[in-house]
Image: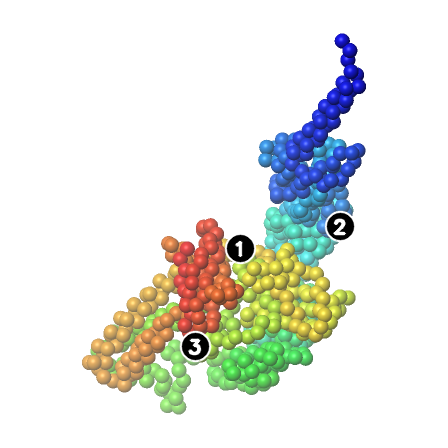
């Protein structure tokens, strides 16, 4: 049979071409990738889908695992991975190669090793089938390796005022420069920290601590991190020891700082009392600490005490408007054995105004405010200029008589044998008339006689009135006084009088930044904010006000901001906050025209456990509520007793007590509407630091917001109208929640109670 070879080869060629086309189409469908049409060797190149780094896990000192997701078409396949590792601290970049399989979910775990402890890294990943083209780079994932807590091995070379700490650290950190923080606590409970930077040449690091008191017990612990970073290890174990005593001499008794007077913009006087050292020449050492920055220095004095062991120590060279902590110790003249440091006393120097600012006297304190805010404070009783302290009076005692003298004349009176404070008076109190009778005692006895046999009722009346006043004050003050840790201030006073209606709400344009706590979102007051130019020159300094607000009017240029507050660190991990908007990330700020620098500052507490703190405040709040109910019960009982006693014994005294009850009762009626809202769980547990947002119902734009305090109360002003409300937070013991609703505002205050 004759075969047509030409036709046979033609058919064979067509079959081969058809097979190649089908094979290429099948491969493209199975690849899970995208055909980008790049032609190599007459065939398309398939680029895999971009991978995603989902998370990092199992983070150690020099290892961690990256969980990576590739294209779904690459499930259960063996792939080549390239991980690009960037050391954020040094800028060093390294590529690490892996060849391993994915699971059925197209995920693979890449084990990183050889990393440095306590270091921030950035990772990206790309992948491919062996021999194929690689995918694009993944997202950037940031992770920080942990740094193990050091071991405080021993304390050596102990002297009267110093010691060497032998600290053992991770040997992987040899050749690095590290910041060490030593926490020092003395036997009196005073705690302070010392920061030391050292280049590491051995796993045993010697840290010298000096400036200690002789014959005093101390406890130390240490933590550390890479130089100029915030990723510190946990604290080490604690070790204690006692400094040596000065040989052949007795340690003087600890002095007492009784008062701080004559405060100016750069100086003040400490009133220091010593024990058993009257009219003696002594050597003093004053330790001065800038509370905002932690900077500490000492000043030496040689002074003679007064007849009662008191001396004035004048401290100069201070910064205006700055809060300082003072401690004092002393020794006998030309002796080397000093006493322990005294109690600590704080004081703030007076302010100096700059362009655009004004000095005013408000609540007996000299403060600096923006010129635009002066009228606001004048309307509330402030006066321009510094507070007049020349006329401040101080009680002194001499020959059994208490007299008032000018503060500026205190030292002269001390030199003449006067003592600070009132003279000790008789047990009943009150003054003594010329005839020797006690005026207050006589009046008290007269009142008792007028009541006759109603002593029990009288006691109940007076006690009930006092209890009613306490109940009223505590009920009105509870939502404010428990908000945050810290001392009472003009801020609290202003909030109280705003709640009582003495001051109306005010609406202002937002031309300021806000300093706030990154965890609780609460504004922070008295934070020192310093503006620098791009070359590091300090340009201006201000402090956040009672609402955490601050601002700088800047000319065109490039600037940086530094902040200082004890116990807090600037938080720069994000550039935007849901509540406050733009947040400073620690980088340069560029200003194009004369304008106020509008940037918010987020700060993180170094050692505050907010959940633990909230739990304690909630327990205190429940106790306060119980005491309020108890005082109210006493008030009701006293009111009834007063009505009965006034009916049977209608004396002037009894009518006065009855009038007090009526005034208290009327005041409760007029102010029974609370001026705050609250968030609680279904079982009555307050929800601290939850966020309450108000939105316009039409435009859905945010109108205002507030953050609940430690006992779940919030104070939120708004224009009258109807709003959508959103609450978000997490109870101390519970899970995070979001709750939506609406609220009508009729008198400028949101007082909605929310149950979650």
Q: Is residue 120 left or right of residue 278?
A: right
Which numbered disc, 2 or 1, marks the residue that appears first in the sequence? Answer: 2
Residue at position x 47%, y 77% in the image: 504
Near mark 3 (Cα within 10 A), the count class, few <14, some 14-19 or many ≥20, is few
Disc 2 versus disc 1: distance between alpha carbons?
32 Å
Which numbered disc, 2 or 3, marks the residue that appears first in the sequence? Answer: 2
Q: Which residue is mark 1?
A: 609
Q: Which quadrant of the rendered structure holds the N terminus? A: top right
Q: Which residue is mark 2?
A: 90
> Mark 2 or mark 1, which is nearer to you?
2
Circle 1 — which element?
loop
Q: Position of residue 278 (x, y in %)?
A: 59, 75
Disc 3 versus disc 1: distance between alpha carbons?
35 Å
Residue at far bottom of view: 434
Residue at position x 74%, y 69% in the image: 557
Question: As displayed, is residue 719 above or below residue 240?
Answer: below
Q: Is residue 495 left or right of residue 123?
A: left
Near mark 1 (Cα within 10 A), the count class, few <14, some 14-19 or many ≥20, is few
Towards the viewer: 613 or 8: 8
> Mark 3 or mark 1, which is nearer to you?
3
Q: Position of residue 145 (x, y in %)?
A: 66, 45
Q: Are marks 2 and 3 in contact (CB under 8 Å)?
A: no
Q: Quadrant of residue 661 in the image?
A: bottom left
Which labelled disc corresponds to residue 33? none
Which labelled disc corresponds to residue 501? 3
Circle 2 — which element?
loop
């Amino acid at each position: 049979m004759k075969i047509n070879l030409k036709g046979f080869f033609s058919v064979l060629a067509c079959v081969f071409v058809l097979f190649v086309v089908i094979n290429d189409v099948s491969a493209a469908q199975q690849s899970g990738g995208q055909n980008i049409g790049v032609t190599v060797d007459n065939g398309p190149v398939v680029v895999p889908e971009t991978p995603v780094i989902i998370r990092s896990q199992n983070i150690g000192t020099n290892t961690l695992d990256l969980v990576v997701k590739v294209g779904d078409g690459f499930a259960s396949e063996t792939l080549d991975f390239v991980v690009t590792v960037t050391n954020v601290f040094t800028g060093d970049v390294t590529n690490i190669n892996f060849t391993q399989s994915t699971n059925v979910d197209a995920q693979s775990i890449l084990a990183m090793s050889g990393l440095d402890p306590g270091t921030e890294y950035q990772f990206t990943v790309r992948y491919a089938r062996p021999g194929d083209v690689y995918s694009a780079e993944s997202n950037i994932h940031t992770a920080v390796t942990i740094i193990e807590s050091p071991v405080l091995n021993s304390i050596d070379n102990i002297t009267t005022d110093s010691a060497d700490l032998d600290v053992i650290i991770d040997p992987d950190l040899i050749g690095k420069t590290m910041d060490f923080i030593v926490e020092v606590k003395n036997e009196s409970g005073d705690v302070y920290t010392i920061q030391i930077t050292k280049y590491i040449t051995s796993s045993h690091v010697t840290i010298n601590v000096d400036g200690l008191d002789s014959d005093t017990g101390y406890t130390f612990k240490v933590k550390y991190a890479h130089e100029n970073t915030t990723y510190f290890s946990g604290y080490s174990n604690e070790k204690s020891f006692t400094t040596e005593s000065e040989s052949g001499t007795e340690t003087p008794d600890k002095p007492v700082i009784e008062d701080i007077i004559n405060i100016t913009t750069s100086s003040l006087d400490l009133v220091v009392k010593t024990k058993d050292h009257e009219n003696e020449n002594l050597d003093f050492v004053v330790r001065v600490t800038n509370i905002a920055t932690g900077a500490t220095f000492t000043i030496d004095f040689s002074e003679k005490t007064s007849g009662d062991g008191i001396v004035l120590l004048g401290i100069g060279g201070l910064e205006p408007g700055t809060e300082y902590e003072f401690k004092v110790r002393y020794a006998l003249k030309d002796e080397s054995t000093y006493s322990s440091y005294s109690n600590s006393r704080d004081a703030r120097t007076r302010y100096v105004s700059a362009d655009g600012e004004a000095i005013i006297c408000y609540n007996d304190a000299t403060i600096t405010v923006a010129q635009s805010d002066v009228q606001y404070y004048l309307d509330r009783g402030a006066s321009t200029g510094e507070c007049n302290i020349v006329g401040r009076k101080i009680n002194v005692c001499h020959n059994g008589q208490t007299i008032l003298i000018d503060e500026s004349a205190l030292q002269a009176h001390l030199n003449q044998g006067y003592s600070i404070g009132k003279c000790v008076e008789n047990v009943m109190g009150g003054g003594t008339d010329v005839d020797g009778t006690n005026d207050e005692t006589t009046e008290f006895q007269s009142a008792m006689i007028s009541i006759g046999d109603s002593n029990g009722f009288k006691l109940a009346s007076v006690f009930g009135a006092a209890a009613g006043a306490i109940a009223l004050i505590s009920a009105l003050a509870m939502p404010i006084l428990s908000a945050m840790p810290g001392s009472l201030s003009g801020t609290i006073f202003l909030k109280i009088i705003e709640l009582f209606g003495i001051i109306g709400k005010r609406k202002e344009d937002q031309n300021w930044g806000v300093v706030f706590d990154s965890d609780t979102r609460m504004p922070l007051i008295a934070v020192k904010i310093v503006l620098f130019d791009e070359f590091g020159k300090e340009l201006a300094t201000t402090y956040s006000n009672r609402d955490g607000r601050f601002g700088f009017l800047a000319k065109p240029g490039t600037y940086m901001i530094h902040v200082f507050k004890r116990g807090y660190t600037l938080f720069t991990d994000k550039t935007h906050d849901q509540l406050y908007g733009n947040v400073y990330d620690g980088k340069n700020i560029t200003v194009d025209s004369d304008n106020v620098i509008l940037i918010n500052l987020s700060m993180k507490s170094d050692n505050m456990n907010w959940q633990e703190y909230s739990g304690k405040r909630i327990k205190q709040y429940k106790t306060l509520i119980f005491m309020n109910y108890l005082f109210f019960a006493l008030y009701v009982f006293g009111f009834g007793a007063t009505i009965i006693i006034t009916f049977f014994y209608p004396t002037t005294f009894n009518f006065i007590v009855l009038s007090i009850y009526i005034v208290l009762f009327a005041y409760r009626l007029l102010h029974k509407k609370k001026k705050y809202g609250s968030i609680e769980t279904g079982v009555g547990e307050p929800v601290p630091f939850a966020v309450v947002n108000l939105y316009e119902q039409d435009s859905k734009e945010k109108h205002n917001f507030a953050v609940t305090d430690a006992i779940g109360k919030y104070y939120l002003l708004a224009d009258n109208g109807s709003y959508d409300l959103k609450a978000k937070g997490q109870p101390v013991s519970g899970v995070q929640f979001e709750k939506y609703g609406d609220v009508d505002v009729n008198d400028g205050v949101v007082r909605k109670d929310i149950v979650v």
